Amino acid sequence: MGSIRFDKVNKMFGATSAGVKVLDDINLEIADKEFVAIVGPSGCGKTTCLRIVAGFEQPTSGSVNVNAMPVRGPGPDRAVVFQHFALFPWKTVRQNIDLGLRNKNLMKEQRDALIADALHLMNLDSHADAFPHQLSGGMQQRVAIARAYVLDPEVLLMDEPFGALDAQTRVVMQEELVRLARVNPRTVLFITHSVEEAVYLADRVAVMTRRPGRIKEMIDVKTVRNAENWNQFQRIEDVMDQESFIHLRTHIWKSLREEKPENQR
Amino acid sequence: MSGRRATIGWATLAALVTLWFALTTWTGMVSTGRFPSPADFWFSLVQIVTRGYAGGQLFTHALHSLVLVAVGFVVAIATGVPLGLWMGWSRRAEATINPVFLIIRPIPPLAWIPLAILWLGLGDAAKVMVIWFAAFVPSVINSFSGVRAIERPIIEAARMLGTPRWRFVIEILAPAAAPMIFTGLRLSLQAAWTTLVAAELVGALVGLGLVLNMAQQDIYPGMVLVGMLAVGALGFVTTWLLGRVERRTLAWNTAAARAA
Amino acid sequence: MIDQPLKLREQIALGLVGLTLFLGLWTLLSVSGLVSRQFLPAPSEVIARFVQLLTTPFAGATLPQHLASSLQRYLFGMLLAAFVGIPLGLLMGWFRLLDDIVSPIFEGLRFIAPIAWVPFAALWFGTGIGGPVMIIFAGAFPPCLINAYRGARFVDPHLIEASQMLGTGHLRTIVEVLLPAAVPSIVAGLRVAAGLGWQSLVGAELIVAAAGVGFMMVQAQANVSTPTVMAGMIAIGIAGMLIDVLLRHGEALIRRRRGLEA
């Protein structure tokens, strides 16, 4: 269904002679409804990976398939949640969520019902007719997530979605996302700088090398999460207190640290 | 305007009017052949409003000028904004049209007046043509810039949502570029008025420019002042109207800017 | 939907297509007689006339001479606008009272198109140099003033605080803090002023001049010499473009020195 497959993907920016190689032989398989996070140093190409799946960039060589079909341009089957929200400032919350549904040519009653559900799901009921600038960053990102979710996409692509939020809001959103993923699971590719965020949210974490980016290692978090039953905890700080969590986090931290240039380690 | 600023404004105005009286009527330091005294001004105003000057009353001249500006302006933005939007989103269109545009652009609109008169005579057609051209250029340029200034994530989000082309233009492209489009409209309006006055100064049968021209030839400073203030007043009113439309249309933007 | 940038080859090719279509259509309309040759001379005729005017006088002088005449007035008008507008703008940005006094007057006068000053210019200066200079001033003064004002008014408050802490007096603050800080804005304003000033010059010369390119064009129009009119337009266009290019480079240079641009 919503599986993603990177096959020998290379990506080069700029002319072939003077270009910059950003991705080097990426091979990655993400199963349907699996939540995979990619962490890596700045410029390692992790966002580029997401953008290729989204259809905003083409690989220079190799292929990316979603559902065993090659990616051909952006579309609502691979919904994107952007770091800086990318809401349309001249549309209300409701209208922002509605656009994707109208593009699918759904009838008004159906759209209204779907929007009502999405608003409720993301706790936006009382803000349906507000404009983005009237909302806080966290609420704007909820709208962006609602806009994506309402399309019932097979794949959800999240590009550092909480990066532009303050620390407290970020934590709240992380907990929300976990709740959402349990209630409404789907394939997620999640890009982040934050190791804690990745370990808290994902089933597997991919660690990338610095540019040109390669996948250095894949860390299986799901097994540990299930074994240690992290799901019993409601609050993120309780999960982060677990030894198993700290162990994983430190492991990934060290792996990332090796990617820094010699003089910065 | 703050209370203090308003007070100073009125005080300055009063001071200037007093100065006006002083320099012209009371001391005669400025000869009335050069600049009208308040009495001269009033006399001219009464004349043109009631009996008329240069072939018509003030209302007739003003209305005629206003209509020409309005027609030229509307046609200019109706042609310029779509062209600018198109050149903004289609690199092919930009590459093809740009060189021609670059050649024509440096020629000041007023420089088209002699050519327009050659082609279309001294009537309204020539004036509308030059006004159209003057107002056309800023609209194209600013609409173009408006499209290019759209943040990439907005466009990508629209594409991700599977937006078809026509809906994209109407619901995404135009609103996103709207702030800059309106900047272009303001410049277009300014250009339209300047060109109208200039064109009427060069040659016209009716209009505020003609009033100015005749008054200058008749050495009638009072009437010159009337003409200038009439031009200024109409310019102010039309700009204000455009501002109202802009505020209405961009309500989401001005509020956002204030919130930012 | 917004296309990717084109390769240079494609850009040039399409540009040539556009130019060819334009010139082709023009030539076709003129040569075929669809539009009277008298009113739409072929591009070749216009170029020929342009070259001819470089040495043959028309309306009293050759094209370069007319252009020199125009540029002279332009320079006077621009210098006057800059030397009055920029200091005044800086002072208004610093002394609130001055701002309160001048701004309303300025805002009121702004709606009168510069060109509307021509009759007074004619009354006061006849066809002398004063007339066009005054019109150019009317056009170029507002951007000079506004940009200097904005540059001074919106200086980083921390810089002002630092200079106050150092005990800097008014005049020195204006000259050594406000002026340098406002330079990028002032230069941007000069670019706009240059364009507006050039337009005002053309307008003024169409109406109240005895020399200059605008005057030449009006004479040509009266004599129904369309190629001359068009040649004049080309000359004006080229001159205006060169002035803008020069100023744009100057602006970029200054911005680079300030680290505002890479």
Image (cartoon, coloured by chain):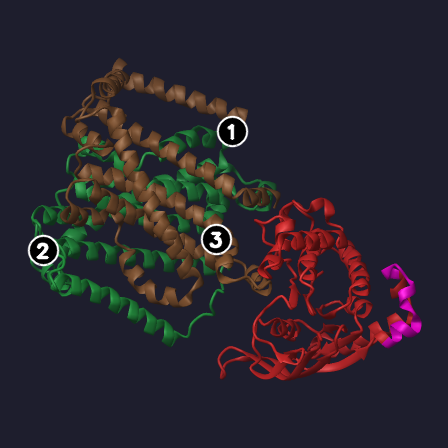
Chain letter corresponding to the colour red: A
Looking at the image, which is closer to me, C107 or A131? Answer: A131
The local secondary structure at tag 1 comes to: loop
**Image colour assigned to chain C:** green
Q: Is residue B84 visible?
A: yes
Front tag of 2 and 1:
2
* Label 2 close to label 1 by CB (< 8 Å): no
Vertical arrangement, residue B104 with respect to residue C83, above or below: below
Residue beneath label 3, please? B174
C213 in relation to B91, above or below: above
Magenta-drawn stretch contains C175: no
- From the viewer's side, name the closer residue of B57 and A186: A186
**Whether residue A265 is situated above or below residue C87 in the rendered picture:** below
Magenta residues (range)? A223-237
Mark 2 Cα-neighbour bin, 10 Å: few <14, some 14–19, many ≥20: some
Is the residue under label 3 in contact with that under label 1 (CB below 8 Å)? no
Q: Is residue C51 visible?
A: no
Three-letter amino acid code at disc 3? Ala
